[in-house]
Image: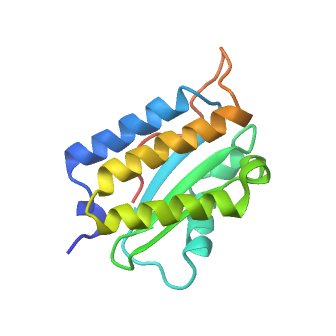
């Protein structure tokens, strides 16, 4: 049974952290990945709570994106802070989730998620390009 701690192997976790770093080279936006065991109720609400807990709402341009996975509840949500959400909206986030769910069912979790992270970086880069003096405001590490 895949719990938060073993949902991805150590090598897969490193692949995902590397994908976050690569995605953030294109944007001033911040991308985080959080894996929980359970999500009771709405995965969007759970993701929004984690978003605040990780202080993602405190980025300078309000352009953080959280990919939230509840391993045992089998729920996924992608939420963006108000700066990027105004540009992309609910439909984009839902399309990312739908694509991920389909690929997770095919047991392509790590590759699918890495692709998702890179796609989020592309979208963030359109609206929030990386500047020369950009700093990494949030950790790229996976939170649990």
Choose between 102 and 13: the one closer to the eye.
Answer: 102
Which residue is more in the foreground, 84 or 133? 84
Q: Is residue 104 above or below residue 112?
A: below
Q: Is 111 on the left or on the right of 132, as rendered?
A: left
Q: Nearer the viewer, residue 12 or 36?
A: 12
Q: Position of residue 48 (x, y in %)?
A: 63, 66
52 and 39: which one is in front? 39
Q: Position of residue 30 (x, y in %)?
A: 59, 40
Q: Is residue 71 visible?
A: yes
Q: Residue at x 66, y 16 (%)?
A: 133
Query: Where residue 46 sits in the image (x, y, percent)?
Result: 56, 72
Q: Residue at x 54, y 75 (%)?
A: 43
Q: Residue at (58%, 27%) from the top-left corner?
A: 26
In the displayed orientation, state which residue is furthest to the bottom: 41
For residue 18, what is the image quadrant?
top left
Task: State which quadrant residue 90 falls in.
Answer: bottom right
Left or right relative to 116: residue 85: right
Scheme of colours in the image: rainbow
Answer yes or no: is residue 29 visible: no
Q: Which part of the image, by quadrant, shows the N terminus?
A: bottom left
Q: Relative to residue 13, is residue 106 depicted above or below? A: below
């Amino acid at each position: 049974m895949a719990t938060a701690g073993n949902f991805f192997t150590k090598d897969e976790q490193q692949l995902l952290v590397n994908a976050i770093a690569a995605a953030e080279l294109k944007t001033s936006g911040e991308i985080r990945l959080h894996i929980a065991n359970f999500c009771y109720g709405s995965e969007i609400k759970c993701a929004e709570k984690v978003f605040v807990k990780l202080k993602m709402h405190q980025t300078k341009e309000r352009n953080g994106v959280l990919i939230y996975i509840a391993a045992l509840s089998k729920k996924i949500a992608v939420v963006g802070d108000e700066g990027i959400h105004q540009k992309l909206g609910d439909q984009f986030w839902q399309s990312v989730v739908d694509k991920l769910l389909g690929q997770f069912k095919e047991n392509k979790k790590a590759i699918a998620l890495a692709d998702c992270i890179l796609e989020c970086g592309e979208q963030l880069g359109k609206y929030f390009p990386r500047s020369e003096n950009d700093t990494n405001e949030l950790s790229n590490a996976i939170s649990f």
